[in-house]
Image (cartoon, coloured by chain):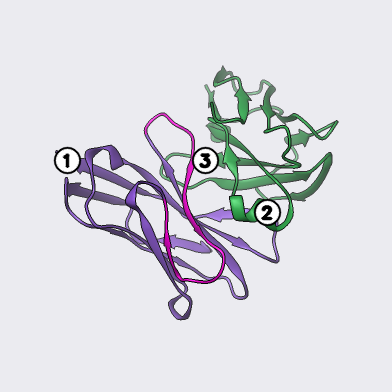
Chain colours: A green, B purple
């Protein structure tokens, strides 16, 4: 049990459909991150929340992508009008804030693998 | 441009061989450095980290890494690998001026019996 839970584990969708993924972080972690990982690449940063505030978004996060963390607990990542290029593993991570958070690093979930056909 | 570079994309070693995986970063200023490992079918796990102090840091499972500031490097080492070390290894850098960890592309390590 990693402590960071992601659902679903796998999602196959047709091009043009919308998909939503959920991440439940470790309960005491106030920071939450979304990353995308494609084959042969390291995780690429998408967006970051501190509590319910979305503080940073990568240029990778196009207008079709939206992320929320409404109560500062779980988070959702929605992709609208999916494209084949969106096929990837979507990773969620959480951490404590400040120096303590950095010193312990992130805890990652197992990811949601999206396949767009 | 890739800000975290891992030189070896695929490494194949026999059991008991020594391992060194290279990592260089291009950020200036204060950084925190990490190595993560991803075993087949599992999530990313922290192997070790450097924040300050002794530049030689020890992590889990016999891994260690050395931070050489002048070379902007944080290479991962293990004196004698085991078959169970087969995994993907990712170097990551946290800039004090930023919010998020930046990862290298990873190195796939295969240890043969």
Q: Quadrant of residue A71?
A: top right
Same-chain status of marks 3 and 1: no
Quickly name the residue at label 2: A100
Specify the subunit that label 3 lies on: A
Q: Which residues are magenta?
A: B40-59
Kindly check if marks 3 and 1 are in contact, taking CB atoms under 8 A apart as contact. Answer: no
Classify B36 as above or below A75.
below
Badge 2: chain ID: A
Q: Residue tagged by mark 3?
A: A37
**Circle 3 SS class:** strand
Q: Which residue is mark 1?
A: B112
Please state which of the two labelled residues, at mark 1 or mark 2, is closer to the viewer: 2
- Distance, label 3 to label 2, CA atoms, is 26 Å
Task: Give the percent coordinates (x, y) of residue A104.
Answer: 60, 50
Residue B52 among those drawn in magenta:
yes
Mark positioned earlier in the residue sequence (3 or 2): 3
Judged left or right of residue A112, residue B74 is left
| Residue A78 point in image, percent of width and height | 72, 29
Question: Mark 2: which secondary structure?
Answer: helix
At 62% from the left and 72% from the top, the residue drawn is: B30
Of the two numbered discs 3 and 1 in the rendering, the one whose residue sits closer to the viewer: 1
For numbered disc 1, what is the local secondary structure?
A: strand
Instruction: Specify whether residue A9 is painted magenta.
Output: no
Chain letter behind tag 1: B
Relative to B65, does residue B100 appear above or below in the rendering?
above
């Amino acid at each position: 049990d990693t402590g960071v839970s992601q659902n679903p584990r796998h999602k196959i969708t047709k091009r043009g459909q919308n998909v939503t993924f959920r991440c439940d972080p470790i309960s005491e972690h106030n920071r939450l991150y979304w990353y995308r990982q494609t084959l042969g690449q390291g995780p690429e940063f998408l967006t970051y929340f501190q509590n319910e505030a979305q503080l940073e978004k990568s240029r990778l996060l196009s207008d079709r992508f939206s992320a929320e963390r409404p109560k500062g607990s779980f988070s959702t990542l929605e992709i609208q009008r999916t494209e084949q290029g969106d096929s990837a593993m979507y990773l969620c991570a959480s951490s404590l804030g400040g120096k303590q958070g950095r010193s312990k690093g992130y805890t990652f979930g197992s990811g949601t693998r999206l396949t767009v056909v | 441009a890739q800000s975290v570079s891992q030189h070896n994309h695929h490494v194949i070693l026999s059991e008991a061989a020594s391992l060194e995986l290279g990592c260089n970063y291009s950020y200036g200023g204060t950084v925190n450095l990490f190595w993560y490992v991803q075993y087949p079918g599992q999530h990313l796990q922290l192997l070790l980290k450097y924040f300050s102090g002794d530049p030689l840091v020890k992590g889990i499972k016999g891994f260690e890494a050395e931070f050489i500031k002048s070379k902007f490097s944080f290479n991962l080492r293990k004196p004698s690998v085991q078959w169970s070390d087969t995994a993907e290894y990712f170097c990551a850098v946290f800039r004090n001026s930023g919010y998020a960890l930046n990862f290298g592309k990873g190195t796939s390590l295969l240890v043969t019996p």
